[in-house]
Amino acid sequence: MTTANKGDNSIPDRLPNRFVLLIIMAVTVASLVLGGLWWHNRDSVAIKRDLNVIRNSKKLKVLLSYDPINYFIYSGTPMGYSYELAESFAKELGIPLEVVVVRDLNQQLAMLRKGECDIVSHFLTITGPRSGIVDFSSPLDSTRQVLIQRKPGKNDSTRLVRKIEELDGKNLHVRTNSAYFTRLKEIMKDKDILINIVDVQGTLTTSELISKVNDGSIDYTVADDNIASTHSALYPNIDFATPLSPTQPLAWAVRKNSPQLLQALNLWLEKEKKSGRLAVIHDKYYNRQYQFRKHAAHAFYSSHAGRISPYDELVRKGAKTIDWDWRLLSALIYEESQFDPEAISWAGAIGLMQLMPSTAAAFKPGDLSNPADNIKAGTAYLVSLEKEWEEIQDQATRLKFILASYNVGPGHVRDAQKLATKYGANPYVWEGNVERYLELKAEPGFYNDKASLLGYCNGKMAVLYTRNIINRYTLYSQVIPE
């Protein structure tokens, strides 16, 4: 240490501890004051884009993230609870809708303030800190936070956490900027316990974290009760019976300098609630989406020898137009509707071949609930998919690309091809290559990849769908005459 000489005005290398503390306190106070000034003037740096500007731009920009409930592409059609609500609001305003996809949920409020979107259009928990940054709409729903944990197996001695105090010393994976993180901090303070909060990337959605608990990748996470209950049909290994918070309101967010937009949004929400439309859309995505019907115990319809279904003649006729074995087309129809001409899926797909009206429209479908019209439109769509994948030389391989495309749309399969190319796999081979990356499009690291233009896709279902049809076709071929 260098010692100062008498008369030397230089500051000693070490100051008394009390003096150091005073300096630290002064710096802290100054930081708080400056921070408070920024906080007070935060709207001066936010983009001003209220309803009048939005109308002139002819574009309502809503921010959404890919996940299995709020926003996804199904058979080429954008769908989801938040998407459908946003689309309805845009129609109410008479302004075209533009979806802005957020890849990192930690950045969503910053994107709103920068003017990259006009509304954060998926549920946010209304919290004090967030209310200081944005304005919230009238609540669309309410929920409570629950602990997501894995149910013990038969030979597993692990006990489920039923009291909050039992979280002491546990590892919980949540996003730092989420309301879940804030709640866990409150719990630690209130209960005087230590929870190891493991920060996860903003690209990981709550859906993905629930999946990781289900498969054992992580032990605990937190979710809203309504999200957890929906996912319990997909992930039977999860338990969500332990509450972590009281009931909290959920809402959309707008910039604080957009009072006209907020007023219009709240008026529309009030009207939708009174009409019952809000409840109908909520039921569609939260209560019905994952109530998939179990396939019949038998692989094929066999009440009459040599027949597959009551629609064999129509199927034979349709198969000739696409040069398919009629038994292959029957296998596809079974997978789609189990030969129920009145089947309507949760997503709105209709009839024997479960066609989305938007997809069928290009083929002048007639009455999709009519078996003949439905098969005619369905086979026309298969012809278009045959052309889509004519680059695949091997016929058996091309069939798998076509079947997967029929299930989730060719765009998602193209994304899987691009991912395969990017990561060194063969984009023209199905097994272990494109198939693998289609499955991976259910994971944020891949559906948020720049090569994945359409985002989230339940690719595992599409891969299983393709295998089921081919396996069933093999069965049909063995027992049903050509």
Image: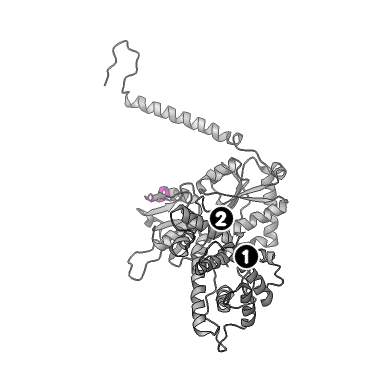
Query: Alpha-carbon neighbours of circle 2 within 10 Å: few (<14), some, or many (≥20)?
Result: many
215 shown above or below 178: below
Q: Secondary structure at mark 1?
A: helix
Q: Amino acid at mark 2?
A: Leu
| Left or right for 367, reference 218 | right
| Left or right for 402, reference 277 | left
Q: Rounded to the nearest whole Å, what is the CA distance between mark 1 and mark 2?
A: 20 Å
Q: Give percent across and percent down for residue 245.
A: 48, 55
Q: Which residue is mark 1?
A: 384
Q: Which residue is mark 2?
A: 454
- Give the magenta part as a residue range: 187-196
207 shown above or below 62: below
Tell me if I can see residue 151 in this picture. Answer: yes
| Left or right for 110, reference 25 | right
Q: Amino acid at mark 1?
A: Ser
Q: Where does the N terminus fall, quadrant-wise?
A: top left
